[in-house]
């Protein structure tokens, strides 16, 4: 006799689907902002990471920007060609490549800084600053948790 598997959770309460819906709520206005510069979300994440971290090795960018290394390699090539970043060999380990923003990359971030901050401010006003902070904490906690037994 085979057991009937338990029913799946309703999609309205499915964490993966809820996260996708939330992502679209947040990313919609950001995509509109980035369209003005013809820059992708992935390139924007790379720019933001480099702006925060300074010159850094590619694997650190991939981790911080939530990109797979092969995808990042293609993105970095395109961004270097567009003049937004520069790559150089690490002085201590010739196998590593260090990536840093150029003036053009910093200027692109500066062009979008006010609008990016306004988008976040509107979200905080709509949802509540405290809730946004709590959500970020919960998501970071979820990210850090391993598989439960």
Image (cartoon, grey):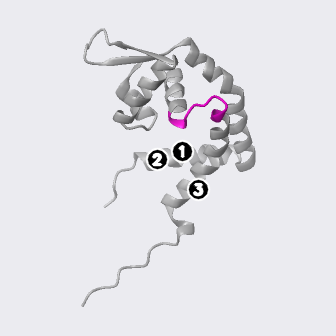
Give the camera-side residue of 125 and 11.
11
Q: In this view, does 96 lie to the left or right of 117?
A: left
Q: Look at discs 2 and 3 and give the one toward the viewer.
A: 3
Which secondary structure lies at badge 2? Answer: helix
Q: Where is residue 31 in the image (x, y as percent from the top left)?
A: 62, 40
Q: Label 1 vs label 2: CA separation?
A: 6 Å
Q: In this view, does 1 lie above or below 43?
A: below
The 10 Å Cα crowd at callout 3, few under 14, some 14 to 19, many 20 or more, is few
Which secondary structure lies at badge 3? Answer: helix
Q: Where is residue 134 in the image (x, y as percent from the top left)?
A: 59, 47
Q: In which quarter of the image is residue 36?
A: top right
User: Sequence-wise, which precedes: disc 1 or disc 3?
Assistant: 3
Give the camera-side residue of 63 and 42.
42
At a point 73% along the width and 34% down the height, the residue shown is 118
Image quadrant containing the N terminus: bottom left
Q: In this view, does 102 lie to the left or right of 36?
A: left
The 10 Å Cα crowd at callout 1, few under 14, some 14 to 19, many 20 or more, is few
User: Sequence-wise, which precedes: disc 2 or disc 3?
Assistant: 3
Residue pointed to by mark 1: 137
At a point 33% along the width and 18% down the height, the residue shown is 97
Which secondary structure lies at badge 1? Answer: helix
Label at residue 21: 3
Label at residue 141: 2
Is label 1 in contact with label 2 (beta carbons under 8 Å)? Answer: yes
The 10 Å Cα crowd at callout 2, few under 14, some 14 to 19, many 20 or more, is few
Q: Position of residue 57 (x, y in %)?
A: 37, 21
Q: Is residue 90 left or right of residue 126?
A: left
Q: In this view, does 19 lie above or below 104?
A: below
Q: Give the range drawn in magenta.
A: 34-42
């Amino acid at each position: 006799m085979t057991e009937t598997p338990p029913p799946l959770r309703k999609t309205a309460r499915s964490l993966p689907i809820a996260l996708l819906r939330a992502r679209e709520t947040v990313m919609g206005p950001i995509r509109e902002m980035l369209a003005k510069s013809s820059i992708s979300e992935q390139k924007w994440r790379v720019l933001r990471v480099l702006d925060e971290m300074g010159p850094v090795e590619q694997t650190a960018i991939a981790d911080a920007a939530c990109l797979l290394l092969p995808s990042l390699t293609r993105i970095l090539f395109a961004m270097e060609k567009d003049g937004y970043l520069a790559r150089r060999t690490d002085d201590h380990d010739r196998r590593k490549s260090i990536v840093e923003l150029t003036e053009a990359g910093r200027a692109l971030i500066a062009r979008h800084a006010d609008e990016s901050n306004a988008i976040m401010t509107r979200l905080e006003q709509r949802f509540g600053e405290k809730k946004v902070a709590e959500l970020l904490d919960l998501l970071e906690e979820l990210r850090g948790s391993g598989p439960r037994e």
